[in-house]
Image: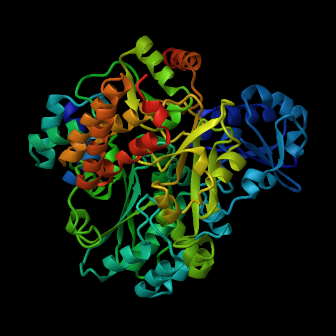
Amino acid sequence: MRKINILKICNSYNNQPDALIEILHDVQNEFGYLSKDALVEIAEALNISRADIHGVVSFYDDFRREPSQGICIKVCRAEACQAVGGEDLAHYAQDKYDAGIHDVYCLGNCALGPAVLIGDNLYGRVTPERLDVLLKQKSGS
Amino acid sequence: MSEQIIIYVPCDAAALSVGADDVAAEIKREAERRNLGIEIIRNGSRGMLWLEPLVEVVADKGRMAYGPVDVKDITSLFEADFLHGGTHALSHGLTEDIPYFAKQERLTFARCGITDPLNLTDYEAHGGLTGLRNALKLSPEAIVDTVTKSGLRGRGGAGFPTGIKWKTALEAKAAQKYICANADEGDSGTFADRMLMEGDPFVLLEGMVIAGLAVGADTGYIYIRSEYPHAIKTMNRAVEIWQNAGLLSGSGKTFDFHVRRGAGAYICGEETSMLESLEGKRGQIKVKPPLPAIEGLFGKPTIINNILTLASVPIVLDKGADFYRDFGQGRSRGTQPFQLGGDIKRGGLVEKAFGVSLHELVEDFGGGTRSGKTVRTVQAGGPLGAYIPPRQFDVDMDYEKLADIDAMLGHGGLVVFGADVDMAKQARFAMKFCEVESCGKCTPCRIGSVRGKETLDKIISGQNVAANLALLEDICELMTDGSLCAMGGLTPMPVQSAIKHFPEDFEAK
């Protein structure tokens, strides 16, 4: 089943090697991470080496080679958020939620920081209290 | 239910981040409860981000603004008859009379926040497509000439004259050429590309098609960072709508678009690195020459321009080179969308002709800090830009005047810091950011950033401060002179500006 889906994703990009990053995103969205087997299957479908794929997957921060726990939470650590207490928020998030918290450098919400991206949803003016409420809503829904 | 009142609630990601979706849903529910006929249009943002969610109602005299609206304000807004422009504690009168908005010169962002981003009819009714129609009547050389004469320079940060880049690609002989729109807007403090893609996506597509006509390219790539899921979604839908409209039919020309996602690498904003990424490879930079305009994507001549550059092209072709050139000063012509962020009271997007002072932007538009502290510094131009002290705030914002004070415009982002910022920590962060984001290709950047960070750690902890500052100066010089691209080459700029303007923060404690 997994293999069929991966081949389908590769095929939707005509098995073109230049679409590798799109394919990796799609596969990760479908399975939550990029397993060793998945990478082998993508390499075969695109007719590129496993070394090439490894090089790409390890270069980009977005790609995960281990199953992730729960939803992806990105906390902005860049300057505009630092100026409004972003570091305190980031430390709070790491201490309390640990796994699932990822550093990110700028979410493009620099006038309304501190900013957090939960899944595909962007939040601004996030305080520790607001983060708790948002994450409670997410886990409840 | 005879009348149908039109209400605008932005769908811009910044507005969504503070609850615009909930506000729109609650307005709809309350109107139904009261049996009132309304239509909610999801526009882009006007750029007055401290007022988001900014709700606008179309009244007899124009669009009336209310903001920042919270879900709990909706009942009282209806009671104040905001549907007919009634007065409320959140009223700001006519949107276009709000000084922050009224004092701007909106050329690139002319439609952003006004139109429905995905309504092509609305786009055309507000001046869209005229530039493209004019371009279709011109020879490639004439289009390039118009862009050259307009004085438009690359808005991504490098400020290279757009017309000259286009001329190089036009003169390159090849059966296949490409247009790449660089939407890897990774600089902290910048969000103009995102706002434009979410608020007026067709203007980018129009600019890309004009670029294609100018250099003889029939395929375009839009490379958008993955941190911008809303922009990716809007651009994908905009491409679909644009292509279905068949705007080039009968012209004998075609233009295909591909929207590609980045994957969390800041370096992919560097043009050669972006090309590698578009080819499905590691985003490592390449040595220039060859210039991408001669040998770019898949080895073919390729124009790589920033979103704001491409989105400024339609108005140049619409109103003419002279119209655009008449804005600005010196060698910095036209307008720049400045982005005010960080600790700022009225953060948002301010499009002004080059020459506006930093003081006007931070104090008059921005209103100083959000926290109430005094402003200690502004970092201009992203994480590789200089920290500017208040005594230099009278500087004119243009490429050359900023270079004169060892600062840079970059992508137009301005991040404001209050009185308690520790500049030694900010300098350390600049090195750390370079360490995290370096592509690893060249030694000055890859190793210099690590050594720079370690040296700053020693300075911060008070070890041999004078000797370590001298060493840090050496590292900075080496990175500036020896790095292959702007990542390593400009990382010293924030570090050295912090030391120069705020030496007290680096003294042994």
Residue at 16% from the left image edge and 36% from the top image edge: A39
The percent coordinates of residue A97 (x first, y second) are 42, 14
> Is residue A62 in view?
no
Q: Look at the image and tell me in which quarter the N terminus of chain A lies.
A: top left
Is A25 placed left or right of B228 in the picture? left
Q: Is residue A73 above or below residue B81?
A: above
Q: Is residue B67 left or right of residue A49?
A: right
Residue B268 x, y percent position in the rendering: 32, 50
Q: Nearer the viewer, residue B94 or A83?
A: A83
Q: Residue at x 68, y 45 (%)?
A: B366
Say whether residue B308 is left or right of residue B304. right
Number of numbered discs on residues = 0
Q: In front: A44, or B346?
A: B346
Q: Quadrant of residue B372?
A: top right
Up-down: is B72 above or below B208?
above
* Residue toward you, B42 or B464: B464
- Residue B472, image x and y in percent? 30, 39
Q: Residue at x 70, y 49 (%)?
A: B365
Q: How is the image coloured?
A: rainbow
Q: Is residue A65 above or below residue B332?
A: above
User: Residue A46 appears at what percent x and percent y?
Assistant: 15, 48
Q: Residue at x 53, y 67 (%)?
A: B312
